[in-house]
Amino acid sequence: MKKFLFISFICLFTGNLFGQSDVIFTHFMFNKLNYNPAFTGNPEVLDIGAIYRNQWWTGIEGAPTTVNIFAHSPLKDEASAVGLSITSDRIGLYETLAISGSYAYRVEINRDSKLSFGLSARIEQNRINWALAQGVDPDAVQGATAATTIAPNFGFGVFYQAKNYYAGISAPRLLKNGLYSETAAFNPSLNTYYAMTGMNFEINKNFELFPNALITINPSAPFEFDLNVNALFMQHFMAGVGYRFGDSFDFLVQYYFNKGFRIGAAMDFTTSALNAKTSGSFEILAGFTLPCKNCDIVHPRFL
């Protein structure tokens, strides 16, 4: 019971800060569509993926669990691209289902670089499931019904991709609405903004390094950033380490099969005060990129 009250308090506190909690992923560099609609179509072929995240998976009852499924592809004219992302997020009594469609217009600067501008439209269903509550008086919550809201949202982003470098800025959710607000309102002081960047260094044909960074800015919350370095061996096996400021040290592995399939896993080891309650978090990733003989741009750095 104490654990449940503890996580519920965290959820309410976070709700007051953000309006809605923003999901995080250790595999953020392989899930850029979740952060920036301008990334839509960037692999130049159909790209499909799914990530399951279990936050604080031991020791804290009602801890966040998140599933994100996404797909995106350029259109026939190649300058335009469309994408779809579905996210299910559960934290204690709170459940969120978001369906987001994205569009990107890409401008080719030269053969090896492209600048993209993206927009996204989103429908969010937010629900408080009182059936999961464990009140002091069971009769007080037995007859309670789920409180549900449905609200729209939208976002924008800019993304630049060069041969060995990428950078992007975005605001994927511009409206404060849904579970913690009765009305939708644009308020720059409450929105979450993202900036990401990364490079790749080809040491030789069998070994490459990929440093990545993600900065999260919300005027109502502490400054956050993720740093990560991945190493790719023999074009198939990847291993990486990361650090989420004030929260965790992270480790990930991933394997790329010959037919476009990939699988991966990540573990976060908590470094904050929560390490007294939990050992950390984990993620599982699976994806498929449509093979394309004429698309030499498809590479782990673009996924």
Image (cartoon, rainbow, N blue to C red):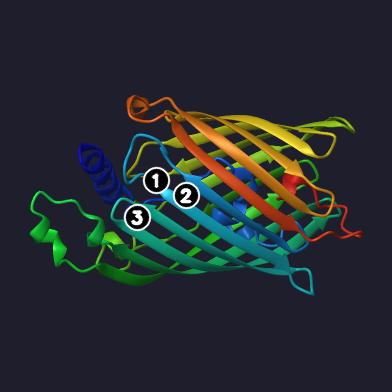
* Residue matched to label 1: 218
Left or right of 17, for residue 294: right
Instruction: Name the front one of labels 3 and 1.
Output: 3
Instruction: Name the front one of labels 3 and 2.
Output: 3
Q: Element type at marker 2? A: strand
Give, as a three-letter code, the residue at label 3.
Gln
| Residue 202 horizontal/vertical position (percent) | 83, 32
Q: Quadrant of residue 180?
A: bottom left
| Residue 217 horizontal/vertical position (percent) | 44, 43
Left or right of 179, for residue 24: right
Give the crowd class for mark 2: few <14, some 14-19, many >=20 residues within 10 Å: many
Give, as a three-letter code, the residue at label 2.
Tyr
Label 3 or label 2, whichever comes before in sequence order: 3
Give, as a three-letter code, the residue at label 1.
Asn
Seen at 16% across and 66% down, the residue is 144
| Residue 53 horizontal/vertical position (percent) | 50, 46
Question: Quick one: which residue is furthest to the bottom in this view?
Answer: 76
Q: Element type at marker 1? A: loop
- Label 3 to label 2, Cα distance in Å? 14 Å
Numbered mark located on residue 20 in the image: 3
Give the crowd class for mark 1: few <14, some 14-19, many >=20 residues within 10 Å: some
Numbered mark located on residue 193 in the image: 2
| Residue 256 horizontal/vertical position (percent) | 77, 45
Q: Quadrant of residue 230?
A: top right
